[in-house]
Amino acid sequence: MVTLMLFTGRIENASALTLEELEAYTDRIKFLLSSQAQTLFASVLSAAFAVAWLCFYALQLDEVAQRIAGAGCFGFTFVALLRCVLVPLQIYEIHEASLDDALSDRREQERAKFKPQG
């Protein structure tokens, strides 16, 4: 997830974009980074509750503490897994935006090439 977040935050050819395109692209990237950070946070909490659950079990603490830690572990694991389902869609969104920008730039170059001079 951290690697995905590192690659999500990059904007190629930012100087070539207009202000409106850059603002739209920045908003899209910030939304994706926020979503990915929430998934990472759920995964870290899942791992922390799993360690706590295992420690409570190994120390043979009361069953209430074990159940609370177990419920936290399984709850955050479920949330993290559901959010991980969104990751391929987020990757698609990033690539789609990049490809759309490249296609738009190419169209403008082709129009400028065939535009009448004068």
Image: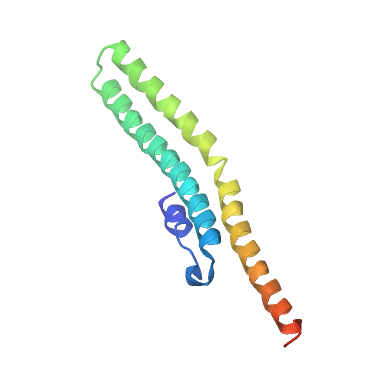
- Residue 45 is left or right of residue 107, and the answer is left
Q: Is residue 106 left or right of residue 25?
A: right
Between 58 and 92, which is closer to the camera in this rendering? 92
Compared with 92, 70 (above or below) is above
Residue 74 x/y as whole percent: 44, 25
Q: Using the image as rendered, state which of residue 86 and residue 60 is in the foreground.
A: 86
Q: Percent x, y for residue 32?
A: 50, 47
Between residue 81 and residue 104, name the one nearer to us: 104
In the rendering, at what x and y percent does residue 60 appear?
25, 17
Q: Relative to residue 16, is residue 36 depicted above or below?
A: above
Q: Is residue 44 left or right of residue 94?
A: left
17 vs 51, left or right, is: right
Hey, which quadrant is residue 111 in on the image? bottom right
State the residue at coordinates (54%, 34%): 82
Quarter where residue 102 is shown: bottom right
* Residue farthest toward the bottom in the current orientation of the protein: 118
Quadrant placement of the C terminus: bottom right
Residue 101 vs 74, above or below: the answer is below
- Write the residue at 53% across / 56% down: 25
- How many marks the image carries: the answer is 0
Q: Residue at x 48, y 64 (%)?
A: 11
Q: Quadrant of residue 53?
A: top left
- Whole-percent x, y for residue 40 in the image: 41, 42
Of 54 and 111, nearer the camera is: 111
What residue appears at the point 47 percent right and 54 percent down from the top-left corner?
A: 4
